Amino acid sequence: MTTLATALVTSSKAPLLLLDDNVVVIGASTSFCNAFNLDPLTIANRKLADLGAGEWDVPQLNSLLLATIAGAAEIEAYEMDLVRKGKETCRLILSAHKLDYFDTDKVRVVLAATDVTPARLAEKQKDDLVREKQVLLQELQHRVANSLQIIASVLMQSARRVQSEETRLHLQDAHSRVMSIAMLQKQLAVTQLKSVELRAYFTDLCRSISASMIDDPKRLTLEAVVDDTSTNSDVSVSMGLIVTELVINAIKHAFPDRTASGKIIVSFASDGGAWLLSVADNGTGMPVGKKRGKPGLGTGIVEALSKQLDASVTVLDAKPGTLVEVRHGQS
């Protein structure tokens, strides 16, 4: 068996070692010697730990090999760094299996080594690039949000100066649209790209809207009641825009009396693949069931975004106030 096993190992194109029960090298493939700069003429009859300049003397590897020799385990994919003086460190994946063929009185173990250094380096470079892009994206989103807030401020100042009531209303509406996008951009800057926890997302969004749009937070409160649902960034962006539009609309129209107190509640709950997003206020209410005027820009935005999410929009009389539900599935 030993002669046959040695011949198979030494002729292999893969980096292989044949070891005995004392972790002594019986044979090595040429590819193993070439890969790790070892002399094929002097490698036999030496302990694995003595190869090279002692870089193979790794206590954990030796323990795993002894367990394999004893039949207690097999090394499937042991990953380790091969540290060699004056040379770059190699990242290796090792596997070892006990040979149970032919004569069973002599224990033989085949150790295979695969150099994955280039693959690990490529993975690291990719991860570094992704992190760098995320940082740049967040910085861009911060700058966009700041620029939009400056534009919104200019629009509001212009609205206060103009004499035409119609022009003032158009400027105020443009201000609300810009603030809507600016606040969403702020949330995107701190949102994870893969998975978004909606409770934290909506809570922060409501806090941002309240700070920007509500003059007296003691008079008018904005609250988020959200379950533990997480979703991807694309869906969260659409939901964030919907919430922003509906909340701004409630702030503008549900509480025309600037001295009256009120509350706006953003709610979200999911059940399997179905979910319900709603914005409710206890203000003056809307003419539900009656003929309304032409839908405004905000209504069109909410309906378009809801359609993207395969959801329906329903406006209900909350008695008092108004309840807008965006429903997906049967939740």
Image: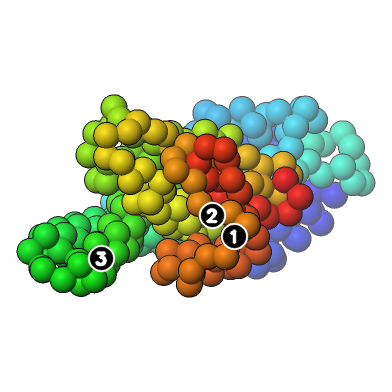
Q: CA distance from mark 1 to mark 3?
A: 24 Å
Label annotation for residue 287: 2
In the depicted structure, whether residue 105 falls above or below residue 202: above
In the depicted structure, whether residue 271 falls above or below residue 120: above
Secondary structure of the residue carrying numbered label 1: loop
Tell me what residue is drawn at x 76 percent, y 50 percent.
Answer: 330
Residue 88 visible (yes or no) = no
Secondary structure of the residue carrying numbered label 3: helix
Residue closer to the observer: 208 or 175: 175
Label annotation for residue 169: 3
Density class for disc 1 (Cα within 10 Å; few <14, some 14-19, many ≥20) is few
Write down the residue under mark 1.
Answer: 290
Residue type, numbered disc 1: Lys
Secondary structure of the residue carrying numbered label 2: loop
- The mark closer to the camera, 1 or 3, is 1
Tell me what residue is drawn at x 44 percent, y 40 percent.
Answer: 283
